[in-house]
Image (cartoon, grey):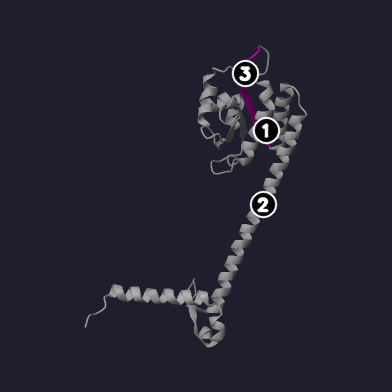
Amino acid sequence: MKQKSPSSELQTELSWEEAISRYLEDHPDYFQHYPEILSRLVLSHEHGGKAVSLIERQVRVLREQSQALQRQLRELVNNARENDILSGRLHRFATAMIGCTSLDDKLDTTYDLLRQEFKLDAVVILLQGKPVQGGRPELVPEDDKRLNSLFEQFNSGKPIVGGKFDDSLMSYLFGGRAAEIRSVALIPLGEKHPRGILGLGTSDPHRFHSGMGTVFLTRLGELLTHSLARHQE
């Protein structure tokens, strides 16, 4: 007579366990028909080994699931509120841009709104253009190597967010305020071929980070790009 190997017995045992599990899943009312079995089932406590009834375990599992769902719901509500606030800020920014006619008005309005509405410590705009002596400092020559090297980093057309960049870049962007800035968002002004950069800086090291979403930053860049387009022709 051929003896079963331990591995085959284990496979048989596991298959029975799986069969029972699937049967109970397909017949969730099983214990209603056989309450005497339910009353005899006990499970070890997760902390301390004390035996508890199946109903107690079910109550505990359901309570934990309820708490997890409540946490997820709070996160969703908080995210929805934050998105609503950001949408309102973008709407006010777009409305303000419509009311501006000159380049000076648009740049000054952008600085004021972003600092106030988005609670930023530093805002910088760099645009490819024809610098004029005594004119706007935001306009830089098209052959500016530092600006062109930044354009090359936007290979995906998405904003770059994170902590502080190297000191030379921080000084190039934020000048004397570079030491105060702890996190940065760089937004290309132009999707495929940027002609400018919007830099946002804050002293909060957690404000901009690599794991954050960039949808609203992208939309902000698009609004500013279209608003400034007629002044860069």
Count neighbours of disc 2 (C-alpha within 10 A) and say few if under 14, some if 14 to 19, many if 20 or more: few
Question: In x, y percent, where is residue 2?
Answer: 22, 80
SS label for mark 2 = helix
Residue assigned mark 2: 78
What residue lies at 52% left-to-right and 75% top-to-bottom? Answer: 26
**Label 2, label 3: how far apart the Cα atoms are:** 42 Å
Mark drawn on residue 223: 1
Count neighbours of disc 3 (C-alpha within 10 A) and say few if under 14, some if 14 to 19, many if 20 or more: some
Question: In x, y percent, where is residue 232?
Answer: 65, 21
Q: Is residue 56 visible?
A: yes
**Label 1, label 2: how far apart the Cα atoms are:** 26 Å
SS label for mark 3 = loop
Query: From this viewpoint, which residue is outermost toward the top?
Result: 133
- Position of the N terminus, as image quadrant, is bottom left
The magenta segment is 119-132
Q: Earlier in the sequence, mark 1 or mark 3?
A: 3
Numbered disc in front, either 2 or 3: 3
Q: Is residue 49 above or below residue 208?
A: below
Q: Is residue 50 visible?
A: no
In the figure, is residue 156 to the left or right of 77? left
Q: Earlier in the sequence, mark 2 or mark 3?
A: 2
Residue assigned mark 3: 129
